[in-house]
Amino acid sequence: MIVVLTGAPGAGKGTQADLLASQGGYRKVSTGDALRKHVRTKSPIGLQAEAVMARGELVSDEILFQILREELGPDSQEKILLDGYPRNVAQAQTLDSLKEMHPVVVAIHLDVDSVELVTRLSGRRVCSSCGATYHVSMTPSKISGICDKCGGALQQRTDDREESVRTRLSVYESMTKPVLEYYRGKGLYHRVDGKGSTQDVFRKLVGSLDGLSLS
Ligand code: AP5
């Protein structure tokens, strides 16, 4: 079964999905992480996607479907947290086409206002080696620029620069917000307030999953 974790860029989807996965029970599937791996390894998909991602636009639905099928795999018993997909209504319909094996049981919207989103994205730093995520002021590493977990160098994502952030927020408004309505129409929409500390949000998220008998 699939729990869709949705929300604007910087809402904390990746952070919360990592926390939930580390408590066991769920496997995180992130289309953004999968795409960045393709870019790092310079695969044919990575070569097509790199410039699109750097601009903050959406990669094609065809490429995403290929990634989705690879990442979900055939195990229908798994509990999967899906971070970053679907990003438009066509992708939501595509995901529905896999419901025999991977039914969506809830779409959780991590809701954060736009001022906070820009603060989070502009201060995000990511380990170039293990992918761990930090924020320069809100969740800093112990030594500036160095990953606490593996000692790797921390970098800013190319799409966290101002111009790309503007594009990503506008793509979210026009393409991804209709996905919230799509799930509302199916009775699967559930809002979680994404403001507050990482641990506060995590408690709210677990509380919601408990309430839905899904944790
Ligand atoms: P993707 O990686 O999915 O990017 P995104 O949706 O823009 O999400 P982010 O990773 O920016 O944010 P997040 O919500 O995970 O926040 P995070 O936890 O990191 O996609 C990247 C690109 O790939 C897309 O633009 C597109 O080009 C392509 N792509 C991916 N999927 C696609 C699809 N389905 N279709 C087409 N194209 C696709 O947190 C952000 C920061 O805030 C961090 O610094 C973190 O430490 C901090 N933070 C988190 N929570 C808190 C908190 N509670 N308080 C304070 N700080 C916090």
Image (tube, helix red, strand yellow):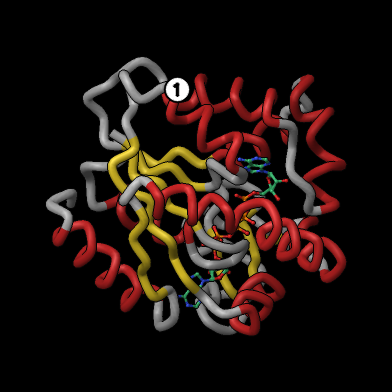
Residue highlighted by disc 1 = 97
Instruction: Tell me if the residue at label 1 has its CB under 8 Å from ligand 1.
Output: no
Seen at 59% across and 84% down, the residue is 137
Seen at 31% across and 78% down, the residue is 200
**Residue 39 percent location from the top left of the image:** 75, 34
Q: Quadrant of residue 47?
A: top right
Left or right of residue 142, residue 77 in this image: left
Q: Nearer the viewer, residue 54 or 86?
A: 86
Q: Is residue 10 above or below residue 47?
A: below
Left or right of residue 175, residue 211 in this image: left
Seen at 50% across and 21% down, the residue is 69
Query: For ligand 1, which image quadrant applies?
Result: bottom right
Q: Nearer the viewer, residue 100 or 202?
A: 100
Image quarter (top left, top right, bottom left or bottom right) of the N terminus: top left
Q: Is residue 33 above or below residue 193?
A: above
Amino acid type for the residue under numbered disc 1: Ser
Can you see residue 18? no
Q: Quadrant of residue 77?
A: top left
Q: Is residue 78 above or below residue 52?
A: above
Left or right of residue 86, residue 75 in this image: left
Can you see residue 52? yes
The crowd level at tag 1 (other Cα within 10 Å; few <14, some 14-19, many 20+) is: few
